[in-house]
Amino acid sequence: MTTATGRSAGTGADEKPEHSADRTRRFGPGTPLRAAAGFALAAIVLFAVAPLVLGDFRLNLLAKYLCLAIVAVGIGLAWGRGGMLALGQGVFFGLGGYAMAMHLKLADAGPGNLPDFMQLYGQIDKLPWWWEPFANPVFALAATVLLPVFVAFLLGSLVFRRRVRGAYFAILSQALAAALAIYLIGEQGTTGGTNGLTDIQGFFGFRLDDPLNQRAVYFIIAACLLLMLALVRQLMHSRYGELLVAVRDAEERVRFLGYDPANVKLVAYMVAAGMAGLAGALFVPAVGIISPALIGVVPSIEFVIGVALGGRATLIGPVLGAIAVAWAKTTLSEQFPAAWTYLQGLLFVIFLAFLPNGLASVAGLVRRRRPAPADRKAAQPKSVPLTAETGGAGQ
Amino acid sequence: MTLVFSQLFTGISIGAVLLLIALGLSLTFGQMNVINMAHGEFIMAGAYTVYVVQQIITNAGVSLLVALPVAFLVAGAMGVVLEFLLIRRLYTRPLDTLLVTWGVALILQQLARDIFGAPNVQTRAPDLLTGSITIFSSGDGNDLMVANSRLFILTLALLAVAALTLGLRMTPLGRRIRAVVQNRDLAAASGIATGRVDRMTFFIGSGLAGIAGVALTLVGPIGPTMGTNIIIDAFLVVVVGGIGQLKGTVIVAFALGMMQSLVEYSTTISVAKVLVFLTIVAFLQWRPQGLFTLRTRSLA
Amino acid sequence: MSTQKPAGLRIRDLRVVFDGFAAVDGVDIDVSPGDVRFIIGPNGAGKTTLVDAVTGLVKATGSAAFDGQELLGRKVHHITRLGIGRTFQTAAVFEELTVLQNLDIAAGTNRGLLTLLRRRKSVPDSVAQAMETIGLTSARDRLAGTLAHGQKQWLEIGMLLVQDAKLLLLDEPVAGMSQDERDTTGELLGMLSEDRTVVVIEHDMDFLRRYARTVTVMHAGRILSEGSVAEVQADLKVQEVYLGHAKATSQALVQEV
Ligand SMILES: Nc1ncnc2c1ncn2[C@@H]1O[C@H](COP(=O)(O)OP(=O)(O)OP(=O)(O)O)[C@@H](O)[C@H]1O
Ligand SMILES: [Mg+2]
């Protein structure tokens, strides 16, 4: 919304306060109607506008961005709402991606054959045991999500239960990302090493070099993103979502109400991990590669900047932020790699030091200029309200 | 037998490097609770300082000795500027600090790339430090040799620890630093300018990163991304060692170095990394606050 | 709200040691069901630490049992689920949530997963009632962080109400409140104590005189004296260590007359 329309809406509210209050109740942020409208709009953009406007190449790029956006939605939940700075999402992205790529590599090679890179490096003549189950498509698909969720469960239940401090959690997540990347690089014979798993030809019987199939992949990704948004929206607006915010702001206090905060956090962390895994799995057919370069410390932190940019505690902010950052990176980094690095550094500094609520807080400022409807007391929230209900009340 | 000793010595020298890079963090992270991801880039700055000094002073030995204090000042000054411009505003938001300083780290890396070029640069080690001495002669050709550079780093690390310990105990500044760590409000109430103490703490912690950078030129490549590769390990050392405790950092640095070296010997580097990580997670189950803790009273 | 017979708290030889310093040093206390027990004592006497020990926040030795159930050694949230609620010396509410959401969370410890994962459709009766009691009905959609200090304290008490705690441990509930706010809190306290056992830590002697049924005086981690308000005030030992506050009490008396 531009400032101009914001103002004209404000004048309207001045003249007919009751009507405006009524409208806020039905269309205000967080209300089901507004959400439905938002989802419809997003669906139109993703399923109709984008495929019509964009050529094959750009649509494929968008598909890649949407995968990153799925990761961002999960980070928004875990970090924005739950206060867990998940700096190791690359691990889950990688687990999902490798699970998918392993299956696709095996399918490409055909039954009984080794994937091409294993033949190339020639150190082994038999498929490693841990590759074997991935030949089964159902197992592989389930693993793309369940494997990350399981690892998140292990790490999360160890870390959260022992009341390890938030900073430690962030550092341990990073260390896990570093360890996994180093492991994958080191075990070249069975993981493809630095190159990763590349040159993937088919996707469950469809050839990936066919533009039509690539479009289908794009549609699958877009649908998954909308689904994940719906899921996270439900979580955010549920009682669980309120509890999660409570745990973020005063974990010990929640304990004294009889809840175990570790469980509350664990759920959000596992959901975020599952979403990163799904995103990694979808990334493989869209881009045709998964490699340690997408998993380590650096890419894991990069996932976070889009979330911070868009507004960590909002639903849609992380999506828009992730897409914007990914787009800027593609556009800038090839021609002006130095400029991109500086910009990225500046984004971290500006958005985390000075605009911790992201661009959403800028939007919030614009909105707050509007006079408050007469029947509501202005509550003067000290920051952007984090919950839907207060979003309506605070204005 | 010699093999065991030689692995032990490798472990000690890995530990000494870990100790040097973690020592500054045990001040800024351990004492002040600031997660400064740009610490690795301060180390990088220290390493490049050697490179620059060697452009001016050709004698490798002299240049190394000159570089030590210069690197301390350069990295320390960078730390003070960072503290003053950004970190000061973020003391109540440690996780945001982590990300902000990551951004600063990216900028510093790119600056290094723009100034010194993307490829690694070479420095010369003094002759005295290029050889190795035989600690133990077995007679069957399996002599136990230790590189002089490694001994130098070990000595430097131990000297730094000693200086820091004494400084914290004996000097007025050290006493003030410890007072602020233990009870910030009380310290402020008793007339200590906590802001200035913070800045000094940050100066010393960052300066130690510069010293570590000088030492690293003797054992590894000097390049724009050298900081990123070591920073996580350094943080792990402080986390496991325990907040606010120097001795924890020292013990854990050597323990982790030893473990890395032994596991690496029996498996591979990549497996060793994963095993070390798992051990650390398991250790934190047992002692979530690290090896040694400073008790404070808070709900958090 | 529970109508069952309130139960009592029984503490034996409770000891909390911080790095060799005994903050609570062998304390025995019995609070009978339905009592309103005030615990007073100079700063650092160990009052808050006592409550911390009973609610599982710090490790302690000895025994603390409520309703026959041993509390020591249990996790904080398990102790809470046995019906023990507390407030903190500095108000601890969820500042970024609304009054309604704060209370709803407190009321919801026993909700199943499915209820948790759904949106709140209506305000639960107990929450509506508690909001009325603490006088925050009109502020139900305000963020708790925007409330006045006194209102935050009341919100905490409201959270105890809906939590259905049988034993309430209040740590300085009227500190920093105006006289009017104190009176309101006192009324709340009366209401709370109708069917609950209440332990109040307080420095305000006027407040104590008006609302306490029994008093325990702590000093340096030990019990100095125990009894009715009059008994404790007459105790010479108390007057000795507590001279400043005794004076304050008589001053308050004078002012009132
Ligand atoms: N976690 C801790 N570590 C070390 N010492 C502590 C800790 N908690 C409390 N103490 C010490 O224990 C003693 C008792 O403290 P406590 O807070 O229980 O006193 P109090 O009676 O509540 O005082 P006040 O009236 O000021 O609230 C104090 O000397 C305090 O410094
Ligand atoms: Mg107290």
Image (cartoon, rainbow, N blue to C red):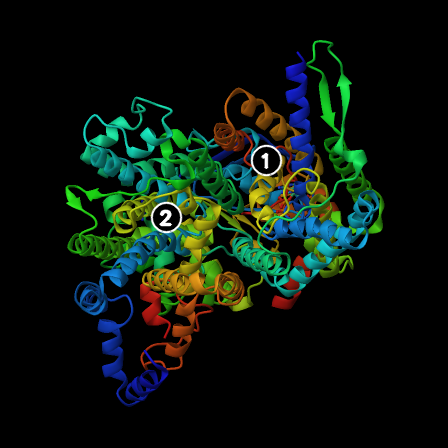
Crowding around mark 1 (Cα neighbors within 10 Å: few <14, some 14 to 19, many 20+) is many
**Element class at badge 1:** helix
Residue C231 locus on image (x, y percent)? 62, 45
**Element class at badge 2:** helix
Q: Nearer the viewer, residue B183 or B100?
A: B100
Q: Is residue B94 above or below residue A122?
A: below
Q: Nearer the viewer, residue C67 or A45?
A: A45
Query: In the image, A153: left or right of B147?
Result: left
Query: In the image, C7: left or right of A230?
Result: right
Residue at left offset 49%, top offset 67%: A355
Residue B78 locus on image (x, y percent)? 69, 58
Q: Give the spatial CA distance, label 1 vs label 2.
A: 38 Å
Dot in front, 1 or 2: 1
Q: Is residue C211 above or below residue B159?
A: below
Q: Chain of mark 1?
A: B
Q: Which residue is mark 2?
A: C163
Q: Hey, what amino acid is under mark 2?
A: Gln
Q: Residue furthest top?
A: B140
Is residue A266 among the parts visible in the rendering? yes
Q: Nearer the viewer, residue B5 or A228?
A: B5
Query: In the image, C147: left or right of B146?
Result: left
Rendering quarter of residue B235: top right
Q: Which residue is mark 1?
A: B240
